[in-house]
Amino acid sequence: MAHDGTSAATTQVAGTSDVIEQLAGITPGSKLAQLRAERPVLVKATQGSHEALFEPEDLGGVSHRERDGLALRVAVLTPSPKLVAWHRARLTGQGEGAATIAAFGQGPDGAGLTTREVALLRHADILANTPGEATPANIAALKAAGFTPRDIVTISQLIAFVSFQARLLVGLRLVGEEA
Amino acid sequence: MSTEKLQFTRDFVTWKPWVETVDEVGPNEEQAALVQKVAPNPKNREYYATLAHDVPALRERTLIFNEIMAGRGGAARADRELAAVATSRINGCVFCASVHARAHAQISKDATLVDRLLNEGVSAEQPEHERAIIDYSVKLTRDPAGLTAADLKPLRDAGFTDAQILDINNAAAVFAWANRLMQTIGESVAPVAE
């Protein structure tokens, strides 16, 4: 692999506008860049989804810390080393300490998490690994922790999007490795 | 909720939400317009009326889904549908599998392959071309980090180009998303006996 997760995540500071390009280590003019350019709607809307879920104009009832903490746990479970590094770096950038970031990575048993965060991470654990095992009780648990229907939709989209993003990156990695 | 697991089927399965839809709580203008646009068919309305609580997320997701499943060029549409069905079969989404099995049967004008996938599972016997798509989708669903370039060989041997491989990969990937959404905020409901 040309870029490991850590270097991809640190290049975020330099700031390009395309998260997948950074995480996959895609350079202009490369085979992967040309292949991606064949589906411009996909490129644009994948970035658009990232922004809608992680940098929305209106956060509703789900904070930046909760969004990136949830995504970190999904990335740990999937697993996706690049997305793990990426969300750790984002949490650090938000001023979160190493202990909090480690707790999100550990999931519902992580030390020092709020009741809301524990509820979120329980939801992530069910969905990331056994998506067919969710029940209405999981929704009730999120409501009991204070999340609104809108928040629950956002949380579910976020978990599902990270599951997608991780696999999109795998396709690019494999086709890139073959070159 | 249902007490026993539904069977995979090509019949019309319905879906019911576990979360209030925007229709129930009173949609704002933006939500109403988006639901009308993405779900003109009332049969599908409840799913999109649930997702419309978060308008930007639904808008972007719809663009991605439509481009991956129906965008011009690249992998044959039947092949993308097959990746969707195989992924849904593993993840347990009976609704998703039924919709995309019907699409596969309609496009390929042959229901036998996809019926075998639904009834017997992802290991059921298939022709080489379909075998390569199903096996790749299963690996991507179960162990994305464990895949290496060597896992592309069956697709290469079956004649898939780089762009077509990415399309198959992305069809399976977008069902990692769809299966999780559909099975988190609601559930598949068995077809009503005629």
Image: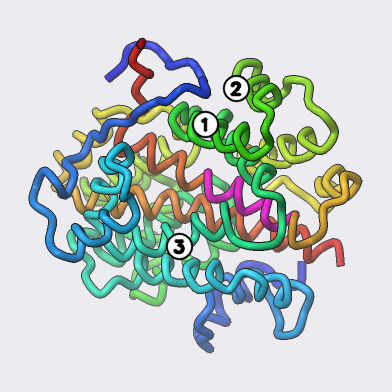
Q: Which residue is mark 1?
A: B97
Residue B146 place in picture, x, y as percent: 72, 45
**Residue B63's mark?**
3
Tag 2: amino acid: Leu
Q: Which residue is mark 2?
A: B118
Residue at image position (43%, 16%) is B6
Residue at image position (32%, 49%) is B39
Find the distance from the CA under tag 2 to the CA under tag 3.
28 Å
Mark 1 and mark 3 on one chain: yes
Residue at image position (35%, 63%) is B59
The one of B173 and A112 positioned closer to us in this rendering: B173
Q: Is residue B46 left or right of residue A106?
A: left
The residue stretch that appears in magenta: B165-175
Label 1 resides on the chain identified as B
Tell which residue pokes out farthest to the bottom in this image: A14
Tell which residue pokes out farthest to the right in this image: B157
Q: Where, quadrant-wise, is the N terminus of chain B in this rendering?
A: top left
Label 3 resides on the chain identified as B
Q: Is residue B8 above or below residue A6?
A: above
Find the distance from the CA under tag 2 to the CA under tag 1.
8 Å
